[in-house]
Amino acid sequence: MLRKRLIWQLYPSFLAITLLALVVATAYCSYTLHGFHMEQVERELHLATDVAASQIALTLKSGTPVDVDALCKKLGESGDGQMRLTVIDTLGKVLGDSNENPADMEDHSNRIEIASALREGYGQSLRSSPTLGKNMMYVAVPLLEDDQPVAVVRTAVFVTDIDRALNSIYINILYAGLIVVLCAAFLSLLLSRRISLPITRMKRIAQLFANGQLNIRVPTAGAAELDELARALNEMATQLQDRILTITRQRNELKAILSSLAEGVLAVDPRGHIVSVNKAAARLLNIDPVHALGRNVEEVVRNVGLQQFVRDTLSSDRPSEGDVSFPEEGGRFFRVHGASLADPQAECAGAVVVLSDMTRIHRLENLRRDFVANVSHELKTPVTSIQGFVEALLEGGLDESEQSQRYLGIIARHAERLNAIIDDLLTLSRLEESGEQRALLFEKMALRPVLEAALELSSVRAEQRGVKLDLSCADSIEAKINAPLLEQAVVNLVDNAVKYSDEGGVVQIAVQQQGKEVLLSVTDNGCGIPQEHLARIFERFYVVDKSRSRKLGGTGLGLAIVKHIALVHGGHVDVESNPGEGAAFTIHLPCG
């Protein structure tokens, strides 16, 4: 619907009121002026009639009707010629007339002014003259003898002359009215603009307020009401600016807090549509935060457990918590806490869900359980064996020298295994302690001498297994290392390669420099490692074939020691293998 501007609502109203007042005033003035002129003419006619009546009365007493008619014509000529004088007897017969021959005139007894004069002593009428055919004003007074009317003297003037004079006055009034109308229209326009312009200016500034430009102020307009409105708008802008600044500051603080949180925070509305998601939640759930906004949780997160938790949180007025797992993403686990949000009317306005990534803790807990189980198993076997053979010796085995020697040899081997396990555990413990790591000394040196020393320690076992050791390392390759630790890591890798290689096999130790890294690899052509074991091969006591490892004298801690030695050097270790094709372990060391 098209709405008019304020000025075009005020201006026509002001103009209409002004025109109406002017029309009423003009009509009233015209009516009053016309009435005033008619009364003035009537008074003049009345006076002239009284003057003529005194003269005609004398003539009527002493003269004849001819004398009366002659006097009428004489009196009519003595005037300005515009007034007509007529004398009529009580029977309506015209005795004399200033303009016409009485003999030719009809009976006047039915004239209104004549009848009124005979009846009331004065008569007046405004009508068309039958004799002249023009509008005339008539005034009549009776001539009395002994208080009895004997004749009527009547005077008359043409109304058209009065109308002509009034018309000239009306034209002047009309011209004056047009000037007044134009002035009134101009003044109405100025007044309308004076009222509408401040309001229009306030509207424009209010639109600027709506667009966020709250530093502008509305100027005063002069009128008390408009000034109060301007002050109210300015106060509103000040309060809005303060509140927006406060909200913006709080929003930025909240955004900074949410961005810095390691926990994921997800906010949804009452229908389950995502309204906010921080970087941590986007990373943990592997979603696009911009694409996720406004979409339903079911569309963004393909996990039934989390979807159900969000629905339960929205339907409950109490905080909730639970565990959610993502097995399809490599076994990820989250601890989730949720709370519903309420609006000022105490109705549900959505919910906030906080996700804590418990994957590492869960895996560490599994590792801890596996470690406890494995170390218990590894320690229980030699301890049980030692305990059994000691009991056999105590029960009489000492009497048989050959048997006791065999028992003692077995006890010694198991004790040696226990000692090896304890030594490896102590080594791992020292490598994991930050204080021990800071106490380690690292020097930039050539790697070949260190590798040759490690191969010399492993050569005896290699010769026993019939395995050849092949070293490929340029003399110029250097790295910042701790020689004893790196030597131990290489010995562990070479011993593992020798143990799992077939007789006549070859273990290759190769070193090459790639960019800012030195790659030290130990490759065998033994039985290899199945793919499902590669992810856990560096865990403590984790072995692929426990019976073979125990038979070969392994503790299950060698590769874990290798991993931690690589870590304290600022590098890492990885493995590539396929069953039946051998395995390749590579230690990545930084050059400097």
Image (spheres, rainbow, N blue to C red):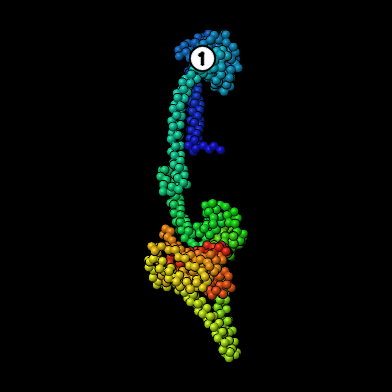
Residue 124 occupies quadrant: top right
Q: Which residue is drawn at 43% across and 33% down?
A: 187
Residue marked by disc 1: 85
Residue 40 visible in the picture: no
Q: Which of 26 and 88 is in front in this view?
A: 26
Q: Residue at x 53, y 64 (%)?
A: 525
Q: Position of residue 314 (x, y in %)?
A: 60, 59
Left/right placement of residue 244 relative to residue 94 reads left
Q: Which of 446 and 429 is in front in this view?
A: 446
Amino acid type of the residue that numbered disc 1 sits on in the rendered structure: Leu
> On the rendered image, what quadrant is the C terminus found in?
bottom left
Q: Which of 118 and 354 is in front in this view?
A: 354
Q: Where is residue 401 in the image (x, y as percent from the top left)?
A: 56, 89
Q: Which residue is drawn at 57% across and 84% down?
A: 407
Number of marks present in the image shown:
1
Residue 378 occupies quadrant: bottom right
Q: Residue at x 56, y 72 (%)?
A: 549
> On the rendered image, what quadrant is the N terminus found in?
top right
Q: Where is residue 239 in the image (x, y as percent from the top left)?
A: 45, 53
Residue 295 visible in the picture: yes
Q: Give above or below for 366 relative to 299.
A: below
Determine the secondary structure under disc 1.
Answer: strand
Q: Which of 309 and 226 is in front in this view?
A: 309
Q: Give above or below for 540 relative to 75.
A: below
Q: Give above or below for 578 relative to 195.
A: below
Q: Position of residue 541 (x, y in %)?
A: 54, 72
Q: Give above or below for 228 relative to 517.
A: above
Disc 1 packing (10 Å; few <14; some 14–19; many ≥20): many
